[in-house]
Image (cartoon, helix red, strand yellow):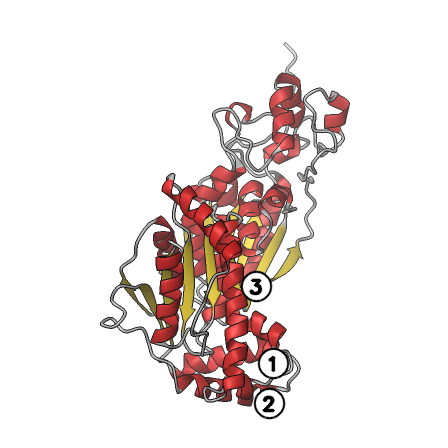
Amino acid sequence: MAPTSLNMNTKEETKERGLKSSQAQGHFVPLIVAFVGLPGRGKTVLAHKLERYLNYTGHQARVFSLSTYRRKVAPDVGCDIIFDPHSDEATEMRKQYTHEAISDCKQWIYIGGDIAILDGTHATVDVRQLLHSLFVKQLGYKILFIECIVEDESLLEGNIKDTVQLSEDYAHLEYNQALNEIQKKIKQFSSTYRPICRKTESSFSYIKFYNAGENIFVHRIDGPFQTKVLNFVSSFRPMRKKTLYFTRHGESEFNLLGRIGGDTDLSPRGHLYATLLAKYFNSSKIENLRVWTSEKKRTKQTANGIKAPLESLMPLNELDAGICEGMTYEEIQMKFPQEFAWRDQDKLRYRYPWGESYIDIMSRLESVLLKLEREDSVLVISHQAVLRCVLGYFMNTAPDKLPYLNVPLHTVIKLTINGFDWNIDYIKFNVDCVDTYRSQPENCSVERSSEDVLVTIPKHFDSNPWRIEPALINT
């Protein structure tokens, strides 16, 4: 069910010769990830999750779904017609949209992409050999097949229900009609589908992903890109129902004073938030709830009272501000105005002297994110910059916008899975606190005035309003 030939035109050949020349100069060889398997096996969810992870970790990856191209080429043709293996007309339509998807893959690599992800069935040996011949032998890329296999009937039933509810193919149909359509589609593909064979396809690199990660078989993984893909796939556990909770620590003493970093205690209002947070989660009776905090006192104090197993993880520590630790923004502007301007110009990549950048946080969070991909019912209590990076990952936020996500104090952020996306809810607790959010200034010039900088600096106290000063003693 795919084209029998994939010829390149002269213009494309010229582009690809230039790409091979750049590879010869020492660049990593681009990777094509091609999914394999019958409909309803979770391929699309895994493809989009993989894309998100790869982009977050510094790669340029994009998903090319054959179903999207099919809907463009034949929007009014039913699945029972277009997937008919005995129809010459259907075969030509399948050739057309598959060719368009592959052409876009090649164009993506040409303009600088590292990894192209082909989301489709690629159900026969001939199709896979054709892809291998084109991408590996003709173009000099590498290709990794990921075959999704579901043998668990209850899991398959859940996957099919999700496909019916989430796929654009069935959006115009009633549930039972959609269910009937996908069953016919599965039956048609089953007549030609051949699993990847270790004997006849021994030269291929592939991963067999059984029953949503219950078991994984790996063959001929080759190179850093394929290793990166395997790293994610081996950690990923798709779940139909999954909820994650995130919150910053309660208001701290440094929050009151507008100081960054440090390892201070909670303020009285922060302690009140911790008390209410414990009541909320203890009364919710969330099954198998676990709590992860940073190593800082303020996150551990916030978790105090929650009846759930607790882990303190170093990667959840707040951004290290280096020589600016414990300073207010006003003090940084006064002592290091050039550094402050540089940070405003590129907050994502700026690294404090002897400290960290947001990119550094994203790097050290990778192990935590992989762990969250396979977990359910976790409450993460961390810090503003760290939670921006975590939430940015799950919400697929553009990297340059990530440092400006608003993660307010005394608020629980609840993520509930929805296919390969997430629904987000903000649960605000009725406990006053300072606002620590600082928007990007319009003027980021090194020559700007202090007044321009102060416009966006959050209000804070000059001293702790709850601190009891020692009484004067008359002598």
Up-down: is 452 above or below 305? above
Q: Is residue 206 left or right of residue 261?
A: left
**3D distance between C-alphas at marks 3 and 1:** 18 Å
**3D distance between C-alphas at marks 1 and 2:** 8 Å
Residue pointed to by mark 3? 421
Count of marks overlaid on the render: 3
Q: Quadrant of residue 100?
A: bottom right
For image coordinates 69% across by 39% down, the residue present is: 434
Q: Are marks 1 and 2 in contact (CB under 8 Å)?
A: yes
Residue pointed to by mark 2? 177
- Front residue of this view, candidates 93 and 247: 93
Residue 305 visible (yes or no): no
For image coordinates 47% across by 25% down, the residue present is: 354
- Front residue of this view, candidates 130 and 75: 130
Indicate the quadrant containing the C terminus: top left, top right, bottom left or bottom right.
top right
Residue pointed to by mark 1? 170
Local crowd at mark 1 within 10 Å, few (<14), some, or many (≥20)?
Answer: some
Up-down: is 470 above or below 295? above
> Considering the numbered disc 2 on the image, is that residue within a helix, a strand or a loop?
helix
The label on residue 388 is none
* Earlier-in-chain disc, 1 versus 2: 1
Q: Quadrant of residue 125?
A: bottom left
**3D distance between C-alphas at marks 2 and 3:** 25 Å
Image location of residue 454, percent across then percent down: 74, 27
> Considering the numbered disc 3 on the image, is that residue within a helix, a strand or a loop?
strand
Residue 111 visible (yes or no): yes
> Considering the numbered disc 1 on the image, is that residue within a helix, a strand or a loop?
helix
Query: Given the image, on which type of amino acid does mark 3 rest?
Result: Asp
Query: Given the image, on which type of amino acid does mark 1 rest?
Result: Tyr
Indicate the quadrant containing the N terminus: top left, top right, bottom left or bottom right.
bottom left
